[in-house]
Image (cartoon, grey):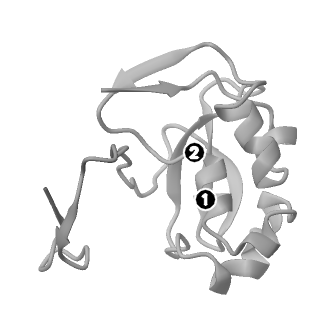
């Protein structure tokens, strides 16, 4: 079981650089509202940190220019677990052009399940496709 911080943040922080988003999602400025589950969704900062480190000072709402440098860019609209605290019923998402924006929770989008591994988990094999899933031990 993992405790996910889900208190939300304002668009000012969610559209900022990955470090700022992280600080307001799970870091020292985060809310104490949590959700316990084995599986969740990615945080906005997870998406930001999936780019090369030299892009970590780029605002997340302008990441579309970096789409070739971020392995999480899928071309679809991906939901995050990060709520937008300034707008009821709205969450941050990674939209098709590969930057951060927000949408109402009733909208459409892709879901990428996220879970944490401890140091005892070992990669066995697999590439992560439906025909060759990743296997862990």
Q: Position of residue 65 (x, y in %)?
A: 78, 80
User: Badge 1, how many Cα within 10 Å: few under 14, some, many 20+?
Assistant: many
Quarter residue 50 falls in: bottom right
Figure check: 64 above or below 108? below
Closer to us: 76 or 28: 28
The image quadrant of residue 47 is: bottom right
Q: Residues within 10 Å of mark 2 (few under 14, many from 20)?
A: many
Q: Which residue is mark 2?
A: 43
* Numbered tag placed on residue 47 in the rendering: 1
| Residue contact at pointers 1 and 2, CB within 8 angstroms | yes
Task: Using the image as rendered, state which of residue 84 and residue 41 is in the foreground.
Answer: 41
Residue 78 is situated, as x and y percent measured from the top left of the image, at: 50, 58
Query: Please, what secondary structure does the residue beneath circle 1 have?
Result: helix
What residue lies at 57% left-to-right and 14% top-to-bottom?
A: 33
Closest to the observer: 122 or 125? 122
Instruction: Look at the picture and state if 29 lies above or below 79.
Output: above
Q: Is residue 85 left or right of residue 73?
A: right
The N terminus lies in which quarter of the figure?
A: top left
């Amino acid at each position: 079981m993992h405790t996910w911080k889900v208190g939300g943040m304002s668009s000012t922080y969610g559209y900022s650089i990955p470090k700022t988003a992280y600080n307001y999602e799970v870091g020292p400025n985060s809310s104490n509202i949590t959700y316990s589950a084995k599986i969740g969704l990615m945080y906005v900062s997870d998406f930001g940190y999936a780019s090369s480190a030299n892009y970590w000072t780029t605002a997340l709402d302008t990441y579309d220019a970096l789409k070739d440098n971020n392995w999480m860019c899928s071309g679809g609209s991906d939901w995050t677990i990060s709520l937008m605290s300034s707008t009821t019923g709205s969450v941050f998402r990674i939209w098709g052009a590969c930057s951060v924006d927000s949408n109402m929770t009733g909208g459409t989008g892709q879901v990428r399940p996220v879970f944490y591994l401890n140091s005892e988990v070992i990669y066995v094999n697999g590439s992560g496709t439906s025909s060759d899933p990743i296997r862990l031990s």
